[in-house]
Image (tube, coloured by chain):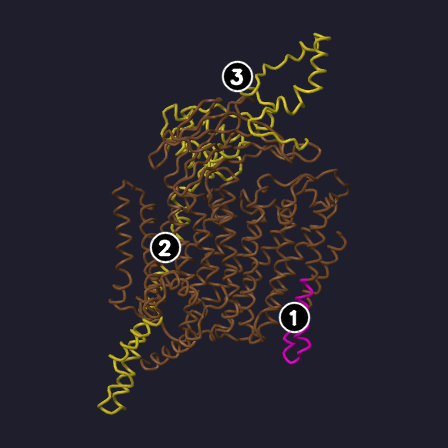
Amino acid sequence: MTFLGNFALWVAFFVGIWGAVLAFSGRWRHRPDLEATVTRTVYAVWAAMAVAAASLWKGLASHDFNIEYVAAYTARNLPTYYIISAFWAGQKGSLLFWAVVLSTFAALAQLFTSRKYRELMPYVAGVTSVVTVFFVSVMLFSANPFDRLPFTPPDGNGLNPQLQNVGMVVHPPMLYLGYISITIPFAFAVAALMSRKLDTGWIHAIRKWTLVSWLFLSIGITLGMWWAYVELGWGGYWAWDPVENASLLPWLTMTAFLHSVMIQEKRGMLKRWNLGLIIGTFLLSIFGTFITRSGVIASVHSFTQSNVGYFFLAFLVVAGILAFTLLYTRWPLLEADVPLESMLSREAAFLFNNLILVGIAFSVLWGTLFPILSEAVRGTKITVGPPFFNRVNVPLGLFLLALTGIGPLIAWRKASAANLRRQFTMPLATGLVTLAALLASGMRDLYALMAIALGAFVLGTVVQEFYRGVRARRRMHGESIPRALVNLVARNRRRYGGYIVHVGVLTYCVAFAGMAFKVDKEATLKPGESAEVKSPYGWTYRLTHLGISQYNALNRRVSAATLEVTRDGKPIGVLKSEKRQHVNSLGQETFEPSTEVGIRSDLREDLYVVFAGTPDGTETAVYRFTVNPLVSWVWIGGAILVVGGLVTMWPGGTPARAVRRDEQAGYQVALVGAGQG
Amino acid sequence: MGDRRLLPGQDPWFCSGRRQGGRRGFLRAGLDALIPPLAAQEPAPAIAKPGSGETGQLFDPGAVGRPRAVTSDVDNDQYIMGIEKRLRCACGCGLDIYTCRTTDFTCETSPRLHREIVSLRQQGMDAQAIIDAFVAEYGEKALMAPRPEGFNLIGYLLPGVAVLIAGVGLVAWIQRRKAAVAAANVAAGASARGSAPAASSGPVSAEDLERLRQALAEVED
């Protein structure tokens, strides 16, 4: 199988190069046969990558431990679903996963893009081929997943215990799908620049792709937080680790693009900015991969250090120079159709929203790279950890949260005082009442107060929009409230899906604020002994250590410490935290013992229990107890965000009347512009 | 290891039959009885059956990782926890000392650093003095965030200043565009007045424009 896998990689390499050369040569312009050939090379590369992927999967499934990758990441007693996820658990396999998914997306883009964008497609094929060839070449020349060992070990090393979690089966593919799908909008942007077809066509062509990419990134980031929370055992979900930051960067710029592209669609403005955002987002996705794989910045998540970092750095620099040079050469063709007229307009609000999103992205990037800069300039190694990122980003995040409420309600072009009064009275009142209630209840943490009050303000704006929409439908069509609500969303999915996303974002922010009230306590307990932990809500948890039981499971020896939990004297259940000593099928220990946390969740807070170990090999247990307020709302916020994203990108939803209205709106705007100009 | 699964709380001492119990245990006990010196060389551990004593010995102590220190009140001292959250563990994990010592139970560095902090605190040093002592010993990288002074100020201030400058620039740009549009409107109005009949004050009246603007706002809201 390794021969077949290697052969498939070489086929993909050469066919991809051929396709790219053909695409960028432009010789297909008057040769339909060559144009078809360019498309076929994309399908051929996909087929070759599928063969390569199947070869590795065959090696993993058949426990071919002569393949170095299979021996390094699997063992005979590894559960099947982790054998599947082992495909992307290591450096080499994940590179193959990247290339396979990218070639699949490239083929889907060729297959499903409307014929009206035909002139763009050969360039799109060229860009996707170049990126695929890059990943294939990294594998062929530096990190080949089909490398063989000089001997065949009787069993493999097994998968890192922290990766043996359902979150790790789903989180990396989701994140990769997000990273990788950014290549398609980037390819269309480059195609538009190269073909000089810089009308809104390329934007319409990538609308679904950008949403898909954003959605996958959102799911990937949320699942990553969930995995970190339930698996790593530190009681948090976001540590501003460089690898976490790397996933956040393209999400931020993609979010900025999803807002600013509306201005280009509605008003024909920000053409250069949007192209810059797409190029920047693609480069940040490559940068994230570089950070994860180069070892240039220390991270608890990163792959082992290897020379693939040099490949990525070179690709990043070359792609950046070429893309921005191309943008520069087309600069005069990208004039705005109409000027921006007022500070009090939706365009301006979206511009400020973009400014803050890109500002946060910059500060995250800056903080991530600052240790390198400091060492280069001063020769002093420094650490830039959560205190730095929180200090710099929390104020920006709160400003962004406020704009989340302001942007959608303010009128296009120029808002009048009456418009502002009509739109913001109720949401502002909601925010202020919430703030007063929180102050009255004794909350004094400034950032938490602001986050929750602004969250209430944003929720007020969304509820008001839904209320007005439903009321209008009831008045016009006499529909019941649920039916009016469903029809309202179904008939304008983009707008109301966007509102649902905003509710997800505010839910995140409120949940993040909850961490300001986290409580930690350590205790050493003999069987029957108890510890008490005070919740920020005022009640008291009593945790009674019942004992430690040890037993064997499929690929591990388990030591489970059990606690009986009461809240203000009322029993609320039993919590269990485990130590797991993983072993291979020969009974050999494969990793240091890992920890599985015990969590009791409700909507108000999580009780989080970590069995740290024993002092003397007896049943006396050392525990860490953490009370984490509002954590459930992080996952709920993520779910709301995804639902909103799905509503937004669901096909259809634009009634014929609305299409006509869009066309008319554009015409009227032009007419007004003409009248004034 | 077989796939023998016990229920939580079930006693592996009886069920597993691997170490002390079972055939091997029985043979060993018989051998010990026959050859007393052998038993003397390796004294039987003082094992209490789990659950039967105050602190029953675990069946497989190695499976729970390295021994942990018994916690004391000082481990829950908020002041010390606050200091530890500002200092980075020197093991290379990138975590602060508190998080590392309560999360990475394979790390031997963070418990040592914790003891060092406790010791310095017991000597009467305050948080800043302890942090300064750590920086003196381990360098500036011991801090979870660099001190906001000197070159590090660039790190702290640049993002905010960049956003501020960009924001001011954006406002200035919008105002300039607004002024340009207004000037163009005035010019267009003047030329329209010059060329159109007196009865009409231009192609579209200001009142009509405002009505149109409001109608558009209604449509696009």
Please name the amino acid that badge 2 sits on: Leu
In the rendered structure, which amino acid carries the disc numbered 1?
Answer: Thr
Label 2 marks which chain's residue? A
For the residues carrying marks 3 and 2, which lies nearer the camera in this image? 3
Please provide percent x and percent y for residue A571: 41, 31
Of residues A555 and A22, the one drawn nearer to the viewer in this rendering: A555
Q: Position of residue A281 (x, y in %)?
A: 50, 60
> Can you see residue B129?
no
Crowd class of label 1 (few under 14; some 14 to 19; many from 20; radius 10 Å): many
Q: Nearer the viewer, residue A188 or A388?
A: A188
Task: Say which of A233 and A474 sits in front.
Answer: A474
> Which residue is identified by label 2?
A401
Circle 3 SS class: loop
Asked whether residue A51 is in view, the answer is: yes
**Magenta-colored stretch includes residue A23:** yes
User: Magenta segment, which residues?
Assistant: A19-46
Q: SS for tag 1?
A: helix
- Indicate the colour of chain A: brown
* Quadrant including the C terminus of chain A: bottom left
Q: Main secondary structure of the magenta part?
A: helix
Q: Which chain is yellow?
A: B
Residue under numbered circle 3: B53
Task: Provide the residue designation for mark 1.
Answer: A39
User: Rounded to the nearest whole Å, what is the CA distance between mark 2 and mark 1?
Assistant: 44 Å
Disc 3 and disc 2: Cα gap in Å? 57 Å
